[in-house]
Image: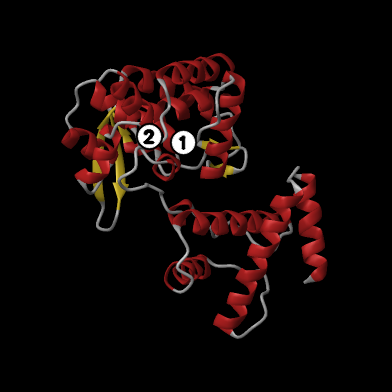
Amino acid sequence: MIKIFAEYITWLQNKGKMESTINSYIKIIERFMKWYFDSYDREFDGKILSLHIRNYKSYLMTVKKLNAKTINNNLSAIKNYCDFLIDKGILDANPVIEDYFIDIQDQGVSPAKLENKDFNKLEEAVVHFGTARDIAVFYTLAYTGIRVSELCNIRLNDIAKDELVIYYGKGGKQRKIPLNRTVKESIDNWLKERDRYKYSYLDYLFISERGKLDRTTVYRIIKEYCYMAKIEPIGPHQLRHYFCKHALEKGFTITEVAALAGHSRITTTQIYINPSMQELKEKIERL
């Protein structure tokens, strides 16, 4: 085990990971291995199954009672370790799939705002410097309001005419989202280049050089363009926030936005019309 950890540390260093990140990953993997031994009464052999990930996530939620962000951090570290095990030939595929991550939505708190001017700068950077795939990813997030996990799980046949079908929950539940011209054109342009990718045989709309596009890559993509645009870094969820707030400002009803965003409760959508502290200050000054 010491040898495999030494190899993993070297692998992380070669990937350019910071020492603090490496130490965090190692601690998380050690805790996962201890849970594995306690749960299955055998030493960890690297043969991680999706079953193990589901059970460990349940353990983190119900026994350890960790919050969603901490659970996602644990899953990200284990996913990274599984990538290492794939490179070592120990695993054939990564058992940590996107569906296991928790979509984080703070209740009753005004979301961090992406101001219009910063959105414009970000859009400009993506269009100017971006690949066809990255442009399609950006516009799909910004103009449909879907979650990053939903984006990664879009299949080619989920797009029909001018609509995107998002499947969720059990029993094939779905919601349909109309696509505007900008999104349709960006996806069409991406599809013209998609066949050049090694994993174009996969039926997922968005792919990378390593296979299906994952949430970690999407976060990295958005942050890279934030850097190019010289704005504060944001994640895909801020684009979802932007869509919801922008739609409400453009005259959509709160019920319509809730349906498009897939909110199960109207109260979740209502946070997008909560005034920010800056807005409150400006109104107070006018008294």
Q: Position of residue 113 (x, y in %)?
A: 41, 30
Please give the name of the residue rendered at 53% of the width and 41% of the height, measured from the top-left corner.
213
Figure check: 250 above or below 172: above
Q: Residues within 10 Å of mark 1 (few under 14, many from 20)?
A: many
Res 43 quadrant in image: bottom right
Q: Which residue is mark 1?
A: 236
- Residue furthest front as drawn: 287
Q: Position of residue 151 (x, y in %)?
A: 42, 39
Is residue 161 among the parts visible in the rendering? no
Q: Secondary structure at mark 1?
A: helix
Q: Secondary structure at mark 2?
A: helix
Labelled pair 1, 2 in contact (Cβ < 8 Å): yes
The image quadrant where one finds the C terminus is: top left
Please give the name of the residue rendered at 43% of the width and 41% of the height, measured from the top-left corner.
148
Q: Which residue is mark 2?
A: 240
The image quadrant where one finds the N terminus is: bottom right
Amino acid type shown at disc 2: Arg
229 horizontally vs 17: left or right: left
- Residue furthest bottom as drawn: 41
Q: How many marks?
A: 2
Res 247 quadrant in image: top left
Is residue 187 among the parts visible in the rendering? yes
Figure check: 181 above or below 25: above
Q: Position of residue 102 (x, y in %)?
A: 43, 53
The one of 256 and 42 positioned closer to us in this rendering: 256
204 horizontally vs 252: left or right: right
Q: Position of residue 249 (x, y in %)?
A: 25, 22
Please give the name of the residue rendered at 60% of the width and 59% of the height, measured from the top-left corner.
78
Q: Residues within 10 Å of mark 2 (few under 14, many from 20)?
A: many
Amino acid type shown at disc 1: Pro
